[in-house]
Image (tube, rainbow, N blue to C red):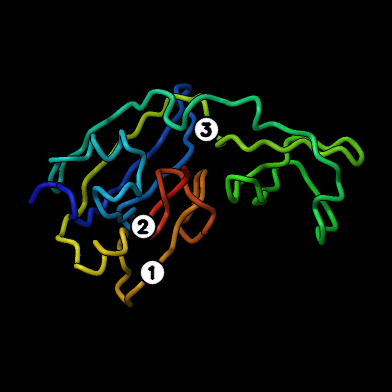
Amino acid sequence: MKIAKNTIVSIAYQVRTKDGVLVDEATATAPLEYLQGAGNLLQDLEKALESHQVGDKFEVEIINAYGDFNDALVQNVPRDVFVGVDELEVGMRFFADTEHGSLPVEITAIDGDNITIDGNHMLAGQDLKFNVEVLAIREATEEEIAHGHIHGEHGHDHGGCGCGVHDHEDDDSGCCGGGHGGCGCH
């Protein structure tokens, strides 16, 4: 069977920056599983996976994988917008409510009561190299196709993984795409 729209695909992968820094991985013992064609991965990665079959190993480089760095997404906000948070630290992540919906932001600097937040994806402006191995492929169920993502062995599952090297138990809007049963940062 080849990877095609509406197949459930299991892959092991490593993602590295142009400088060779490992930013994400899934192993054969803890693979990424996703629904092909549902937009749950980076579009260029999904295209590169199309037509591959179990056992295929390949490399794909995605230029500017998460788009350009947008200076307008870096803002200074007062400390009091973090209601209910006693201690703030650089690197903490939150969801900010905006006119366009919820946006993940990271604290990048703290100067007294002046907090700098960045709404760019942590890999914005970077080229990424994916080393991928296709581990398994199966047809998606009607329910998975209707919901647009894979369902776990016990039914409806919305697990995800985080950006950065991880053990696939985080639920932090992960690295490879849209979430819902696999990694997902958009």
Give the CA separation, mark 3 to mark 2: 23 Å
N-terminal of the pair, mark 1 or mark 2, is 2
Residue type at tag 1: Asp
Q: Which residue is mark 3?
A: 123
Q: Residue at x 36, y 39 (%)?
A: 42
Tag of residue 21: none
Extreme-left residue of the structure? 1
Residue 68 vertical placement versus 44 (above, below):
above
Q: Which residue is mark 1?
A: 157
Q: Are marks 3 and 2 in contact (CB under 8 Å)?
A: no
Residue type at tag 2: Ala
Query: In the picture, residue 13 is in which quadrant?
Result: top left
Residue type at tag 3: Leu
Query: In the picture, residue 176 is in which quadrant?
Result: top left
Q: Which residue is mark 2?
A: 30
Q: Would residue 79 be found to the left or right of residue 108 on screen?
A: right
